Amino acid sequence: MPERLEVRKTYKLYLGGKFPRSESGRTYEVTDSRGRFVANAAWASRKDARDAVVAARGAFAGWSGATAYNRGQVLYRVAEVMEGRAAQFADEVAAGEGLSATKARAAVDAAIDRWVWYAGWTDKLASVLGGTNPVAGPYFDFSLPEPTGVVAVLAPQRSSLLGLVSVVAPVLATGCTAVVVSSKERPLPAITLGEVLATSDVPGGVVNLLTGDAAEIGPWLAEHADVDGIDLAGSGTTAMELERSAAGTLKRVLRTTAEEPDWTADPGLSRMTPFLETKTVWHPIGL
Amino acid sequence: MSPFEYAPAPESRSIVDLQPSYGLFVDGEFTPGRGTPLTTVNPATEEVLSEIAVGTDADVDRAVRAARRAFTRVWGPMRPADRGKYLFRIARLLQERAREFAVLETLDNGKPITESRDVDVPLAAAHFFYHAGWADKLDHVGLGAAPRPHGVAGQVIPWNFPLMMLAWKVAPALAAGNTVVLKPAETTPLTALLFAEVCQQADLPPGVVNIVTGAGDTGRAVVEHPDVDKVAFTGSTEVGKQIARAVAGTSKVLTLELGGKAANIVFDDAPIDQAVEGIVRGIFFNQGHVCCAGSRLLVQESVHDEVIASLQRRIGTLRVGDPLDKNTDVGAINSAEQLARIRELVGIGEAEGAHPWQPAGELPDRGFWFKPTVFTDVSPAHRIARDEVFGPVLSVLTFRTPDEAVAKANNSTYGLSAGIWSEKGSRILSIANQLRAGVVWANTFNQFDPTSPFGGYKQSGYGREGGRLGLRAYLKES
């Protein structure tokens, strides 16, 4: 008999900076890797996804309009706050993914370091991807990357924290806002990440985390006319159908691979450039 | 009115050696197509210019095989500097034969000779010259050391800038080491076929560039061919969506340059005379057959009457007529089909309550023509404020505050280009920041350059053409 009975957490959605239950009232049972009950997670619905898109759209002007320096500091703050809760993340990752304590902690460390890495990118993208163009005429001409808008992220199904951070952080680094559908069977790190984001100066609505089934919510997000891009990382066998749907509104699509990639590998710019537009501005030079 | 009359100053068409019929250009040779041939006409006279082969699925397959072979055996393994030299050769050949290309483009497309001569052809040559220099410097495009080409590029281009669009597609593809199967537009294939002759003169290895003429079915065969690795399309948003759907679930890489409905914003502190020139250039350049045309004029309310009066006076001096005449400002509409589309949308504009205005003057009896048209009292809900007309039709809306201008400008499913007219630098930069458009022209309009990335936001497509970013679309990390 433990000395003290633990206080368990209710795992809810993270939407518009708040932690609501699913509007549908649905929950589903989350088990650990050995099948033991862990929690009843909120089972997000199509309407929750729509609300999340509204929240993400509302947050876009502020987040994309913030200075790159400011966004970098906010992302770094996420790493700081995560560091303080590393033990909790490690427990959740170990339970959900069936990893040893050491390996789970390594995944958490890599996830924290990924935030730091992307934090450093925010104010370098424009100089790496943009520049002045030496046009053959009396014009000052420059090109700059700009965020695409609202991005739907179907998070990886297996790597519940490192994979999740690896797909969410780049979207934020570009200045886009995100609607994220977590791993279905391993959703707990996503909700804990929501708690971190809520206390890290990330404005409400910039990231919206839905726990549930990407196969159920994905098609609505792929079709949604106010979603500008979609990362298909965790879409599994529905990837082709979702890409077809996304074509109806010409969304920017980041395709997925049959096998989940090694999330510890250096991602380069590969997860940011799909959600960046380029704006070219011309102005005459003259007296 | 001017006391002076213009004497006709027609450019001679004798420089062009039109053949009665053209085949497909596959594997370095002209070969017959298996489809039922189509004819291409001069839209200014409706005269049939030539008979054009139509590529079937089997023809496209033959072209893709030739391109694959050339990629594997010749173009891929070639020293990058030599690839560059071929492109320099092509650039020079285009310059040498510039007048011939310009006259042919004007005959086939209907655009004024001054534009084909001074814009289309020089820019096409410039694109080859620019990309030629990239061929042996690919380590510097930002994809790490030794980036690799995709392989075979399938490219489908529109009729509004036939040779220039060819150059925008072919030059970066070849510089990066890809080989090409290109499908020119159904109504404007002739300069692409003359370009095939340039490839022969340059001794470009067979199969590196293949040109398969035809209509939509031929284009679909190119896009959907399983051995095409990279698809690039310029054209309508509707077809762009079909293509995006068709490549879904494949490993094909796609770039799309689609429609637009650009806002051209005139603030009350703008230099009005300059702005009027820019408005005219923005919408009547190339008969308005321009995806980035400034088709929505947003004028600050306080200068609306002054701008419209000045604009109408200026439009009254535009000369509409024989595209080969060097005095002509506005040429022929490219096809009967496009003319019907323009007429339909203009009819809808009138029916919805906007007020059309056209200058005085006669149009030629034969050919496809539409007068420069300005609609005032347009509301953002009108079809002529939302749909791409792709013709010489300007819709005028007003605004009071900068915020309203931005909101109205961004109120579009498109996001290709925009214009800003103001003498205040900080205002220009602020508005440019807020516009959701891929190209923003401030105190100018419709400028293009091979070093300058071009392409859209939202449903105007994705990917860029021009500059380092445009080239990257034809490469992948090794």
Image (cartoon, rainbow, N blue to C red):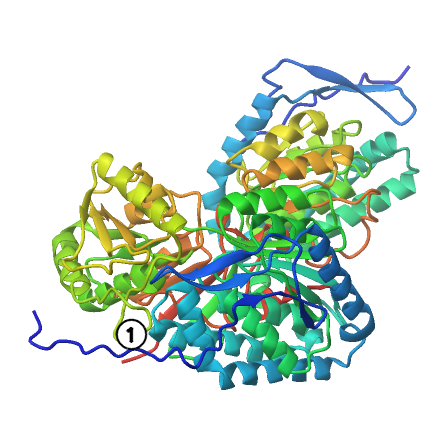
Q: Quadrant of residue B49?
A: bottom left
The x, y position of residue B217, in whole percent, is: 61, 48
The x, y position of residue A166, in whole percent, is: 72, 46
**Residue A217 versus residue B410 in the image, above or below:** above
Quadrant (top left, top right, bottom left, bottom right) of the C terminus of chain A = bottom left
Which residue is depicted at the point 67% across and 14% down? A26
Report the front residue among B328 and B404.
Answer: B328
**Residue B386 versus residue A49 in the image, above or below:** below
- Could you classify mark 1 by the number of other residues whose Cα lies within 10 Å: few (under 14), some (14-19), or many (20 or more)? many
Residue B467 placement, left or right of B433: right
The residue that mark 1 highlights is B325
Quadrant (top left, top right, bottom left, bottom right) of the N terminus of chain A = top right
Residue B334 placement, left or right of B466: left
Which residue is depicted at the point 29% across and 74% down? B325
The residue under label 1 is which amino acid type? Asp
Q: Quadrant of residue B367?
A: bottom left
**Residue B284 versus residue B135 in the image, above or below:** above
Q: Residue furthest front?
A: B20
Report the front residue among B445 and A260.
Answer: B445
Residue A77 seen in this snapshot: no
Residue B6 seen in this snapshot: yes
Q: Quadrant of residue B284?
A: bottom left
Which residue is depicted at the point 74% across and 56% down? B61
Report the front residue among B442 and A87.
Answer: B442
